[in-house]
Amino acid sequence: MSQGEAPVRLGILLSGRGSNFVAIAESIRAGRLKGVEIAVVISNVADAAGLAKAKEFGLPTEVFVSKGRSRTEHDADVAACLKAHGVDLVCLAGYMRLLSKEFVAAFPQRILNIHPSLLPAFPGLDAQAQALDYGVKVAGCTVHFVDEDLDHGVIVVQRAVPVLETDNAHTLAERILAEEHIAYSEAIGMVASGEYEIRGRRYVKGKRQAGKIEKIETSR
Ligand code: GAR
């Protein structure tokens, strides 16, 4: 983003405590993450702590409970809500749901996820415990674009932490989480700048190309 341009609008999707969302919101508020604003915070869990935090911050919030509905139906409502709020970049922040292929197609290379492992190692649930049980000496987190496969898309940022002999899954998860809070804002800034290209599976920094972070058409 260059000066004078409209900020890139973020749509945050979360299911739980929302510490990654809070870290992003605080980075924006402190001026460390520039050129973006949070347009809406959406949850599939009505009493998610992250949603309460979003309300405290005075941000628009929406809940779409998924129980009893097909994934396609539910995701169509979430996608419509994101578009109605003029969202340019969707950020999954502890959103513990698989996305339908229609949802992914509605935001091509416009969905980021954070995962608590150095992908492609340990995709899926309980990544920190998987890493500990496997016996790796270095763990970490990954911010990546979302594609149709689980924890699979192009990697934007990774941060590593050592695994200590004294670690249990909880202490390792805490140390990784501190790095997640740095990595997510960094990745959002990199993507929002538009100064990159994707070569195969590789995110490569480069000059911004015209129309790179073009606004997704919205109904606003
Ligand atoms: C984070 O550790 C995030 O990496 C993980 O859930 C936690 C959410 O914490 N996400 C996944 O495992 C997704 N596969 P938060 O609600 O405090 O941000």
Image (tube, helix red, strand yellow):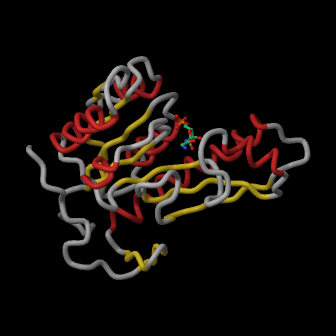
- Which residue sits at x=20%, y=65%? 214
Q: How many marks?
A: 0
The x, y position of residue 32, in whole percent, is 44, 54
Which quadrant of the rendered structure holds the N terminus?
A: bottom left
The x, y position of residue 199, in whole percent, is 42, 79
- Which residue sits at x=44%, y=41%? 98
Which residue of the protein is positioned furthest toward the right in this rendering?
A: 165
Q: Closest to the observer: 145 or 12?
A: 145
Q: Is residue 50 above or below residue 207?
A: above
Which residue of the protein is positioned furthest toward the bottom in this rendering?
A: 207
Q: Closest to the observer: 187 or 97?
A: 97
- 204 relative to 86 in the view: left or right: right
Q: Closest to the observer: 218 or 26?
A: 218
Which quadrant of the rendered structure holds the C terminus?
A: top left
Q: Closest to the observer: 217 or 200?
A: 200
- Which residue sits at x=30%, y=78%? 208
Q: Is residue 156 above or below residue 41?
A: below
- Which residue sits at x=50%, y=28%? 16
The x, y position of residue 173, in whole percent, is 70, 40
Which residue of the protein is positioned furthest toward the top in this rendering?
A: 47
The x, y position of residue 141, in whole percent, is 62, 53
Q: Is residue 170 above or below residue 68?
A: below
- 125 relative to 19 in the view: left or right: right
Quarter of the image where ligand 1 sits: top right
